[in-house]
């Protein structure tokens, strides 16, 4: 049986599910787009090719395995985009929580069922149907669970709104020993630079006390101020709207000192090295055209 253990974003990674781009199927139509950045690239004729995405994920896998990480993969389902495994589930402490994701993506769950079967039933949690929640909106730091949400009355009109306030309530009740804090995020169906698809698109802790953050990703200034107070302004790397669009905050920590980052993120990668991090740069720009990057492609199961 898999003995799950994840308490933060940065402890030494032991086992992870990494998405796959094999048998990804034809490019989606504009009507099939889940997010404004994918839509933008579909309309521009720049949507990534399967071969480019397969290559980029293979480079990510190479880095993970070089650091001794056990990399599990979803079963390949023909014609299905299975890159962003973060959305379909997540681990808190030693529990696996199955996300309630967009109905059009429900088939992705079956591709990891063989892994779920290795988890003790007592350590598996299914959120009630009315609770919307995706793993990209759930970030762990110390005794905190940060949750990206959208709480306005027009929630149902945005397929870019993936976690509702019931999701925050659910995690609060399920993990009463944690401090659960919701953050309302900006949403747009058509403008990628005005859309934080998940919390990890505008915020992510790194190392032991630092974080990457886009101040404009939060609807309420008080939410941004809350993070500044927790981490200290001197420990935050603030990114611009353009850098948020390029997914600067969606890097991935192998451990507290080692970060996998996109090789084009020059300003971020320089800052990381200046602050003592080991940076593994890989190509991931093509996958980023779907409004997801390195963290989105992973579902950590065990961090030591």
Image (spheres, helix red, strand yellow):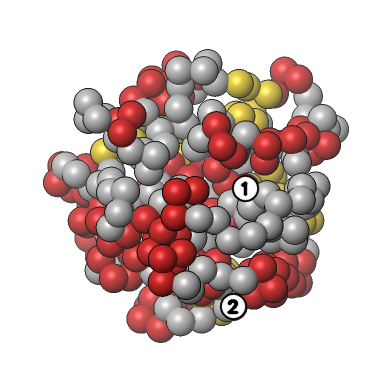
Foreground mark, 1 or 2, reads: 1
Q: Is residue 258 visible?
A: yes
Q: CA distance from mark 1 to mark 2?
A: 19 Å
* Image spot of residue 41 (x, y percent): 43, 67
Give the residue at mark 2: 282
Task: Please name whichever residue, 227 or 208, is drawn nearer the observer in this view of the structure.
Answer: 227
- Name the image quarter holding residue 275: bottom left
Kindly state the secondary structure of the residue where label 1 is placed.
Answer: helix
Q: Residue at left 76%, top 20%?
A: 121
Q: Are marks 1 and 2 in contact (CB under 8 Å)?
A: no
Task: Please name whichever residue, 81 or 172, is drawn nearer the observer in this view of the structure.
Answer: 81
Mark toward the start of the polypeptide (1 vs 2): 1
* Image spot of residue 118 (x, y percent): 83, 32
Give the residue at mark 1: 85
Q: Residues within 10 Å of mark 2 (few under 14, many from 20)?
A: some
125 lies left or right of 151 = right
* Image spot of residue 158 (x, y percent): 33, 38
Q: Residue furthest left?
A: 221
């Amino acid at each position: 049986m898999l003995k799950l253990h994840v308490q933060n974003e940065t402890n030494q990674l032991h086992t992870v599910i990494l998405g796959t781009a094999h048998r990804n199927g034809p490019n989606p139509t504009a009507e099939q787009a889940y997010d404004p950045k994918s839509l933008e690239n579909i309309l521009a004729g720049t949507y990534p090719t399967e071969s480019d995405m397969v290559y980029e994920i293979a480079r990510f896998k190479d880095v993970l395995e070089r650091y001794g990480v056990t990399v599990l993969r979803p079963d390949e389902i023909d014609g299905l985009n299975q890159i962003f495994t973060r959305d379909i589930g997540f681990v808190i402490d030693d529990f696996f929580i199955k996300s309630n994701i967009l109905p059009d993506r429900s088939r992705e769950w079956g591709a990891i069922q063989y892994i779920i079967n290795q988890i003790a039933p007592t350590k598996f949690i299914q959120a009630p149907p009315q609770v919307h929640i995706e793993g990209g909106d759930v970030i762990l730091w110390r005794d905190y669970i940060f949750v990206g949400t959208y709480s306005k009355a027009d929630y149902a009109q945005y397929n870019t709104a993936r976690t509702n306030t019931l999701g925050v309530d659910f995690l609060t009740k399920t993990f009463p020993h944690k401090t659960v804090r919701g953050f309302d995020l900006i949403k747009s169906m058509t403008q990628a630079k005005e859309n934080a698809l998940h919390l990890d698109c505008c915020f992510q802790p790194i190392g032991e006390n630092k974080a990457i953050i886009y101040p404009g990703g939060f609807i309420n200034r008080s939410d941004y101020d809350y993070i500044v107070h927790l981490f200290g302004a001197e420990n935050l790397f603030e990114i611009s709207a353009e850098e948020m669009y390029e997914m600067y905050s969606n890097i991935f920590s192998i451990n507290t000192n080692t970060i996998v980052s996109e090789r084009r993120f020059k300003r971020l990668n320089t800052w990381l090295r200046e602050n003592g991090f080991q940076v593994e740069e890989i190509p991931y720009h093509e996958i980023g055209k779907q409004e997801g990057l390195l963290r989105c492609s992973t579902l950590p199961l065990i961090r030591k």
